[in-house]
Image (cartoon, grey):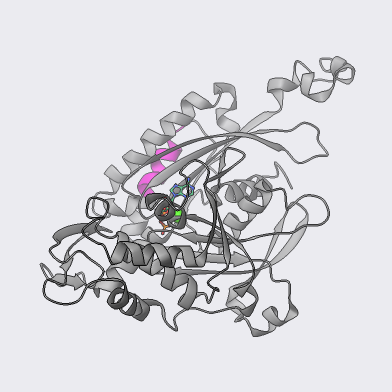
Amino acid sequence: HSNREMWFRDFFPANMCPINAKADTFYGIMFDAGSTGTRIHIYTFVQKSPENLPELEGEIFESVKPGLSAYADQPEKGAETVKRLLDMAIDAVPPHLWKTTPVVLKATAGLRLLSEEKAQALLLEVREVFEESPFLVPEDSVSIMDGSYEGILAWITVNFLTGQLSGQNQHTVGTLDLGGASTQITFLPRFEETFKETPGDFLTSFEMFNSTYKLYTHSYLGFGLKAARLATLGALNMEAVDGQMFRSSCLPKQLEAEWHFGGVKYRYGGNKEGETGFEPCYLEVLKVVKGKLHQPDEIRGSSFYAFSYYYDRAVDTNLIDYEQGGVLEVKDFERKAKEVCDNMERYNSASPFLCMDLTYITALLKEGFGFRDNTLLQLTKKVNNIETSWTLGATFHLLQSLGLTY
Ligand SMILES: Nc1ncnc2c1ncn2[C@@H]1O[C@H](COP(=O)(O)OP(=O)(O)O)[C@@H](O)[C@H]1O
Ligand SMILES: [Ca+2]
């Protein structure tokens, strides 16, 4: 707009100015290619004045299952799922803003676990879908995200949404993300001790909104909930063994079934003659986590935000409400694990993996990260109606790199 057209701006409060209402709205499209599903987040921002940060106005969210890695041998079909989601953005973004709206896809642990060749074939097909769209396709718009970014960006999202990244008196909160194939822990250390006793590759400096944050973050590949199921069954990285039956005391005795993950078929079942229940199950699961994770002393007493499968399993067992979320203690997961595992017949109609999943979450929190029984977990799916996902942090980072914000 020329200055002449905008002369009346000064006569209106910014948010009532008739031109402001639309002229300074812009969009960002971020795809989360997770191991269990692909999701599109279309964010709307409003730049109310040039000297302030743009404000997040809203989000449109949609998802499909399974994830891209399920199309390891049909990359074109995989990219087709992305195209269908991108069509939503065509409807959501006004046509005159298409060519300035960036679109980016970041894949997480599902693609990290595929062979380089298969992963690249998928990414290439997705890139073609983007190039054929009317949106702005930045360099490197389709990639596998580094695990440490996954944690950092989720931390940025949660702390931005809870208002901890603006103004003084920042009381940031740590984040726990439990995906299908990997799990992340991220927090801002308060004690010098933590920096001293932490391996260097668990610490990253990150710049956002004119501040530098030195964060503790790590992504454990193969420690997501579904990968942990395979590890517990002894089936992780066992692609070669066809038709083998994997048994566990964490599954209903009479169960025999098949399961597809990452394009591989697994047969699994309960301990027909042997033991079942929480005690033997906990011992099995313990083998997967014990001694495998770094335990920062500082986190033992502090509270964390937890989402993804922590949230889903807490909902499944009525520990929290699906809409509201809630606050739990680590020991609540253990109590539920015992209840479910020691009464497996009663929970048969739910997922046969419920006992194993809850037991794994308990072991991961206690023996993996070293949390106390009474550590508080804030379970949230949305804050102010925005999904608590790394995608928002990634979109801020993207806007920053495009010079649209700082
Ligand atoms: N928009 C979302 N925000 C936060 N978590 C989500 C969202 N969509 C799905 N999830 C959760 O992510 C978990 C699945 O992890 P996923 O992202 O597929 O695997 P990974 O992170 O290991 O690649 C599920 O618990 C699912 O509820
Ligand atoms: Ca994820």
Ligand 2, by image quadrant, is: bottom left
Q: Write down the quadrant of residue 25 in the picture.
A: top right
Camera-side residue: 330 or 207?
A: 330
When the figure is inspected, residue 212 is found, relative to residue 39, above or below; the finding is: below
Residue at 56 percent across and 23 percent down: it is 94
Camera-side residue: 185 or 240?
A: 185
State which quarter of the image contains the N terminus.
top right
Camera-side residue: 96 or 40?
A: 40
Residue 230 position in % (x across, y down)? 28, 68
**Majority secondary structure of magenta residues:** helix
Residue 213 position in % (x across, y down)? 72, 63
Q: Left or right of 151: which side holds 211?
A: right
Q: Left or right of 366: which side holds 355?
A: left
| Number of numbered markers | 0
Residue at 81 percent across and 35 percent down: it is 50
Q: Left or right of 313: which side holds 391?
A: right
Q: What stretch is highlighted in magenta?
A: 124-133
